[in-house]
Amino acid sequence: MPDPYSMSRRVFLTRAAGLTLTLGGGALVPSKALTATNPYAGGWWLAGDHHIHTKYSPDGLYEIVEQVAAARRCGLDWCVITDHGGPRHDKVALNQAYPDLLAARRAHPGITVFQGLEWNIPAAEHGSVILPVGAEEAEHAARFEAIFDEKNETLRGAKNTEAVAVQAVQYLESITPKPLFLANHPARRGLDSPHEMRAWSDAGPNVTRGFEGAPGHQAAGLTGHPRGEYDNKPSANSFTGYPAEAYRTFGGYDWYVAKVGGLWDSLLGEGRPWYITANSDSHKHWDDRALVDGSTYLPKGYVTRTGKLADKPAEVDFFPGEYSKTWAFARRRSPLAVLEALRAGSMFTVLGGLVDRLELWASAQGEAATMGGTLVLGRAGSPVDVTLRLRVPTGPNLGGETPRLDHIDLIAGDILGPAADRDALSNPTTRVVAQLRAAEGKREGRYLTFRHRFPAARSSFYLRVRGTNTRVDEPGLDVVGVNPWSDLWFYSNPIFVRLPAS
């Protein structure tokens, strides 16, 4: 599958003057005018979650095998165990947790279980580090944590800097086969500045590939908490350029993603392969009242159950895959193929089972590109045809309700090249090109197909889609206590469309 990062170097040679695609003038066109071949034929759609905690996190609860069983029960094909780094945790992860992970793989051979880590990024927030399945996966994870985790004993004071985080990403880039690094709940505390994300991308172009678009803790509203536990305010360590609204979620998605023309679009406008995911950040299920003894974490390496129960549910998490899913399209059903699909942006995110297939491709002159890929045009002024194929549910989701898709937004923006300001927060060329009503799609069984034409591409651009069961034009700021099952969204990853190199 094409890698947009390798092709983006061409566009960096010139700065596009503007997205001259007649954005408001594109239209639904008859299917006979478009490429009929579906480039998603011949692969596997595999659902997963890259952010899961167990008793080996100080705020966790479950055994690794329990979380893997829950993931499988909720329909996942792959998952990543990402317990928190911390004092001496690298040794616990290697000598205690990893044997449990291997046992979980044996107990549940139908799901791929990756070794991972929730990295405490120096001078920043958290991130999922995902290791390729292999003989050295645990050693690589433990070594990385021991050297570069902000809460491990190795890093103190002056070493907890942005420069150390860049060194850490360069270290990940040196590992073969290459791991993957995704920033977690990036806007929650405002610690991940735009220039840090650009620095991580530059330092590890093959391993740094994006952030959580839909953070975990989505069950928070069911127990009276802010959705995603996004309830912070700027601190002394927060990036000063973020507005107050950045610290909240919108339709369950991070402000970086939900705001059209915002930070995600700014990164895409540079041609960066920066992709989004959705996951559970599962620690304890929202209705599980089991109380935990955290005092055993440091001496034993894990927390223990007390046998006592809280008076009422107070947690904020769903089980892995119960509410949020990242669907990856892999050409083979193998661990490496899943990891490479994530690296390539061949995936979409969805809440509450609103859809379980999203096939998006752009085509021109007999060539096509899918999510994460790049379509290189033969000449400026070529028409570009976009096809979106969705599979909608006919039965209840895991919340007991059958979602009804209302509409889809097609979004596009210029590829402008590198931003002069490394803290740039916006791409002013990005806009909603068209709103497609679910009733307008061509129905074939559970599938809905939509088509759109950009009549004349005169600059390089990218496109993406989002959809919802609501009737709002833009996702609203989530109020405290919102029922997550009533406000569902999906977001695709982008397709890059480029003019021939000058």
Image (cartoon, grey):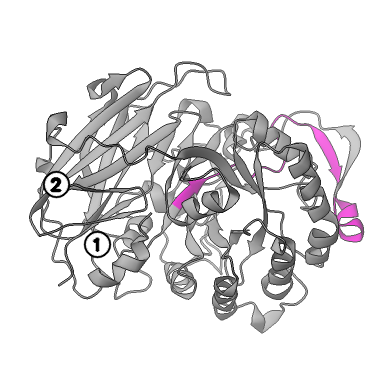
- Observer-nearest residue: 228 or 202? 202
Query: Which residue does the image show at 79% across and 55% down from the upper left?
Result: 98
Q: Is residue 351 magenta?
A: no
Identify the element where label 1 is drawn: loop
Q: Quadrant of the N terminus?
A: bottom left
- Residues at marks 1 and 2 touching, judged by CB atoms closer than 8 Å: no
Q: Which residue is mark 1?
A: 415
Q: Amino acid at mark 1?
A: Ile
Q: Position of residue 378 (x, y in %)?
A: 14, 58
- Observer-nearest residue: 116 or 420? 116
Query: Which residue does the image show at 65% across and 81% down from the upper left?
Result: 159
Q: Position of residue 436 (x, y in %)?
A: 24, 31
Q: Is residue 292 magenta?
A: yes
Q: Which residue is mark 2?
A: 23
Q: Quadrant of the C terminus?
A: bottom left
Residue 380 at least partly seen: yes
Tell me if 358 is positioned left or right of 204 in this view: left
Query: Which residue does the image show at 55% across and 61% down from the upper left?
Result: 181
Q: Amino acid at mark 2?
A: Leu
Q: Which residues are magenta?
A: 276-302
Identify the element where label 2 is drawn: helix
Label 1: few (<14), some (14–19) or many (≥20) C-alpha neighbours in 10 Å? many
Tell me if 32 is positioned left or right of 419 in this view: left
Q: Is residue 189 above or below residue 400?
A: below
Q: Is residue 345 above or below residue 160?
A: above
Tell me if 40 is positioned left or right of 332 in this view: left
